[in-house]
Image (cartoon, helix red, strand yellow):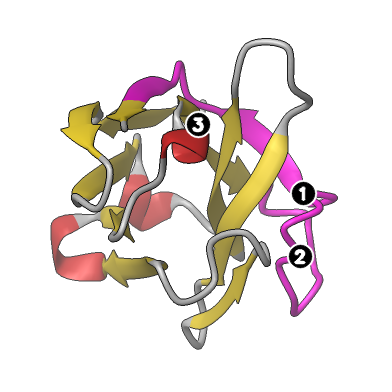
Amino acid sequence: QVQPVESGGGAVQAGGSLRLSCVVSSYYSYRGNCMGWFRRAPGNDREGVAAIYKPDGSTYYADSVKGRFTISQDNAKKTVYLQMDNLKPEDSANYYCVAADYQYSGTQCSVSGNWAAYWGQGTQVTVSS
């Protein structure tokens, strides 16, 4: 069973930074092509934030976070990261790490999440003004 587990959420003032981490159980045997981050704030729809195509490291971002967030992977540490800089109050949400099923054969990982199969429990990010 593939299970993403997030960490690194917290509270920060506007303009600050946080780094989220995601470890997938059975990472080395995990064969999915895509991993990414989604978020959901109370009263809002779920929003794709960033994604990474694992074979070559290509990255994809929502327009709302381009230039401020960076997704990366460290295979040695079996971890995918989301570095969030210049945070804004509107970034406050529960952030979820998501992984594709190995049967997803696409070569792109759109933030629409059409590849998303496994979801973590989420980690809260709160940005105060």
Label 1 – label 3 distance at C-alpha: 12 Å
Residue identifier under label 3: 96
Horizontal and vertical percent for residue 121? Answer: 45, 16
Q: Mark 3 or mark 2: name the one nearer the start of the chain.
A: 3
Label 3 – label 2 distance at C-alpha: 16 Å
Magenta highlight range: 101-125
Residue 100 vs residue 8, the one in the foreground? 8
Horizontal and vertical percent for residue 111? Answer: 72, 58
Residue 86 vs residue 116, the one in the foreground? 86
Which amino acid, mark 1?
A: Gly
Residue identifier under label 2: 110
Give the side of residue 67 with respect to residue 129, left or right: right
Q: Is residue 114 magenta?
A: yes
Residue 59 appears in which quarter of the rendering?
bottom right
Horizontal and vertical percent for residue 115? Answer: 78, 51
Q: Is residue 53 above or below residue 50?
A: below
Residue identifier under label 1: 113
How packed is label 1: few (under 14 Cα within 10 Å), some, or many (20 or more)?
many
Describe the element under mark 1 as helix, strand or loop: loop
Q: Is residue 129 visible?
A: yes
Q: Is residue 128 magenta?
A: no
How packed is label 2: few (under 14 Cα within 10 Å), some, or many (20 or more)?
many
Name the residue at 21% across, 49% down: 19
Which amino acid, mark 3?
A: Tyr
The residue sitting at the top extreme is 42
Describe the element under mark 2 as helix, strand or loop: loop
Residues at discs 2 and 1 in contact (Cβ within 8 Å): yes
Q: Is residue 8 visible?
A: no
